[in-house]
Image (tube, rainbow, N blue to C red):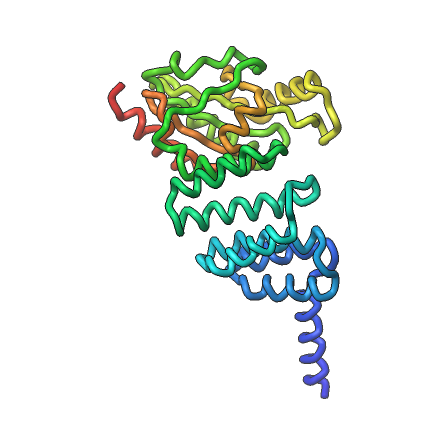
Amino acid sequence: MKKHGLLAALLICAFISATAAPGDLARLVRTKLSAGDLLSGEAAVEDYKKQNGVDKEYLDALGWLARGAELLRQNEKAAAYVAELRREIKEEKADLLGAWGAAIEVEGKLRAAREGRDKAVKFLNEELARAKDTALRSRISKNINQLSMEGRAAPKLGVTDFIGPKPPEFAELKGKPVLLFFWAHWCGDCRAQAASLGNVYQKYRAQGLTVMAPTRFYGTGAQSKTATPAEEKAHMEKVLAESYPGLAGISVPIDTETMVRYGVSATPTFALVDRKGIVRFYTPTRLSEAELSRWIEKLLAEKP
């Protein structure tokens, strides 16, 4: 009897752990997807809908299911989730930007797989033209850039406001490879990148590498407190000095449209521009020092 009682208790615990409490559904789905377990994520979302109906939490989790299904190449399921999101969310809403953005992102990827890159980019550009929120616009631009930025001239950087020396135009940098490090002062992954990025800059600057670190105002300063642009800029300078000593002296353009244009919905984001001003590498992720070095050495080896 004791064995049966223990088994029953374990089954109950397993059921409880697999059932999302309010506020935990998206987290549970992400955890399941990180293990490649789409089916468990679907079951949790289905159970939640039966108990709570369609609400923000359900739609956020549905957006994660769409992303997970597409990542796992289960495109029919991904398309079905996108269709449901489109039915439930008719227009851009401030409290549903995550789910709305997921629907656009996944549909773009599905169109690329089904109809080709050009039609996917056309769809995403149409969505970008309608989008209002800065983070949403950046997210859509990221997806456009992942499909089309490499091999094209680097988009212009806004240079109205900046930290350090005035950012040069790409035309002034012809003959030199340029590494763009898009960051945010509050970003932990950006700070984790600081040592390797500083090493790379110090290693290759004598060979002509230019590094710039574009960012934008987020409206916050120290301890995430609301800040004026002047206060936030002062905080950025403090963060740069304390956390990025290897990048001392580089240009730091501060411009929202630059961040949108380069699709910086995730920080850090990297773009590597060759001697002719063409983007050769673009990724919205952290990079190892070895990977950064590999790409930079490849461009340095090319003739001016």
250 or 272: nearer the eye? 272
Q: Residue at x 44, y 57 (%)?
A: 73
Query: Which residue is farthest bottom?
Result: 1
Q: Percent position (x, y) of residue 185?
A: 62, 28
Q: Residue 13, located in which quarter of the rendered image?
A: bottom right
Q: Is residue 37 above or below residue 230?
A: below
Q: Is residue 205 left or right of residue 11?
A: left
Asked if 270 appears above or below 33 in the picture, the reply is above
Please, is residue 301 above or below residue 92 in the view? above
Measuring 39% from the left and 40% from the top, which residue is drawn there? Answer: 118
Quarter residue 242 falls in: top right
- Identify the residue shown where x is 68% and y is 84%: 3
**Residue 232's image quarter?**
top right
Give the percent coordinates (x, y) of residue 193.
51, 33
Residue 21: horizontal and vertical position, in percent? 73, 60
Residue 58 in view, yes or no: yes
Q: Quadrant of the C terminus?
A: top left
* Residue 28 placement (x, y as % from top left): 64, 57
In this orientation, does residue 267 appear? no
Q: Count the marks: how many?
A: 0
Classify the position of the N terminus by image quarter: bottom right
Residue at 55% in and 65% down:
39
- Nearer the observer, 87 or 141: 87
